[in-house]
Image (spheres, grey):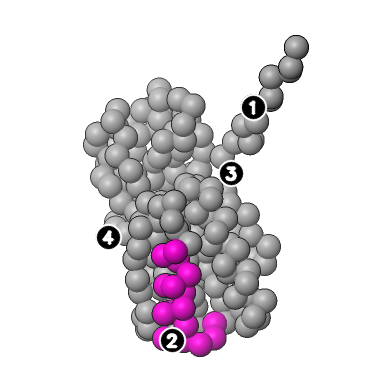
């Protein structure tokens, strides 16, 4: 079983290939506005390590909407070319940490934050949107659990910086843990799309 994993939901992207538990390829890159210029050459190098895949695991976020969409598009193309099964896994499950149980938080804009409690590769709570006070209460109720965030949050200075990795995504997929979607994938949405109506011309 050969698994390709792609993770681009945060500022650090990564690609990994795992065959029966053995890491064949792993590479990290900046997941910035030029994501495509980093991701697609990386995928070409990954194919040299393994020319075909049985399954492709994608980190669905929450995080960068455009980053996740680009990964899904790339994976869909590879699926069409080689027939691999597409798997969607919350990116929060793949944060690089030695802790089996941890909390992931992030700034969701508009005075809100996301919260998820992860235990042994599964979301046991969330991801959910909370306001500042709700998040402080949630963190207080799990005071002994380490807290991670992909990017520093000024008002939550106790959170450690931690990002998900494609290698961890691949290993989750191999073990069958954390999979929330198969086939047609969509990023994890925490709220309905915010649409600004155009002003009427008088």
- The alpha-carbon separation of the residues under discs 1 and 4 comes to 42 Å
Looking at the picture, does residue 46 appear above or below residue 138?
A: below
Q: Which tag, 3 or 4, sits closer to the chain's start?
A: 4
Q: Is residue 162 magenta?
A: no
Secondary structure under the numbered disc 2 in the rendered image: helix
Neighbor class of circle 2 (other Cα within 10 Å; few <14, some 14-19, many 20+) is: few
Q: Which tag, 2 or 1, sits closer to the chain's start?
A: 2
* Residues shaded magenta: 37-53
- Quadrant in which the C terminus appears: top right
Q: Which residue is mark 3?
A: 189
Residue 9 image offset from top left, x and y in percent: 46, 53
Q: Which residue is mark 4?
A: 98
**Which mark is in front, 3 or 4?**
3
Residue 177 is at least partly visible in this image: no
- The alpha-carbon separation of the residues under discs 2 and 3 comes to 34 Å
Q: Which residue is mark 2?
A: 48
Using the image as rendered, state which of residue 175 and residue 47 is in the foreground.
47
Residue 38 image offset from top left, x and y in percent: 41, 65
Q: Which residue is mark 1?
A: 196
At x 50%, y 43%, the residue is 127
Residue 179 image offset from top left, x and y in percent: 56, 63
Secondary structure under the numbered disc 3 in the rendered image: loop
Q: Which tag, 1 or 4, sits closer to the chain's start?
A: 4
């Amino acid at each position: 079983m050969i698994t390709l994993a792609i993770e681009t939901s945060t500022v650090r992207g990564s690609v990994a290939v795992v065959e029966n538990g053995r890491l064949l390829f792993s590479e990290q890159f900046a997941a910035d506005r030029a994501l495509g210029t980093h991701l697609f050459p990386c995928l070409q190098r990954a194919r040299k390590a393994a020319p075909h895949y049985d399954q492709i695991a994608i980190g669905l976020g929450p995080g960068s909407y455009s980053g996740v969409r680009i990964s899904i598009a790339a994976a869909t193309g590879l699926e069409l070319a080689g027939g691999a099964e597409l798997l969607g896994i919350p990116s929060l499950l793949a944060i690089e940490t030695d802790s089996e149980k941890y909390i992931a938080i992030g700034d969701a804009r508009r005075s809100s934050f996301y919260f998820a409690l992860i235990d042994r590769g599964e979301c046991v709570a969330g991801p959910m949107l909370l306001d500042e006070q709700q998040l402080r209460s949630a963190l207080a109720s799990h005071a002994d659990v380490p807290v991670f965030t992909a990017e520093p949050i000024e008002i939550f200075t106790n959170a450690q910086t931690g990002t998900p990795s494609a290698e961890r995504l691949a290993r989750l997929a191999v073990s069958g843990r954390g999979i929330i979607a198969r086939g047609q994938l969509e990023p994890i949405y925490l709220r309905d799309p915010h649409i600004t109506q155009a002003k009427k011309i008088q």
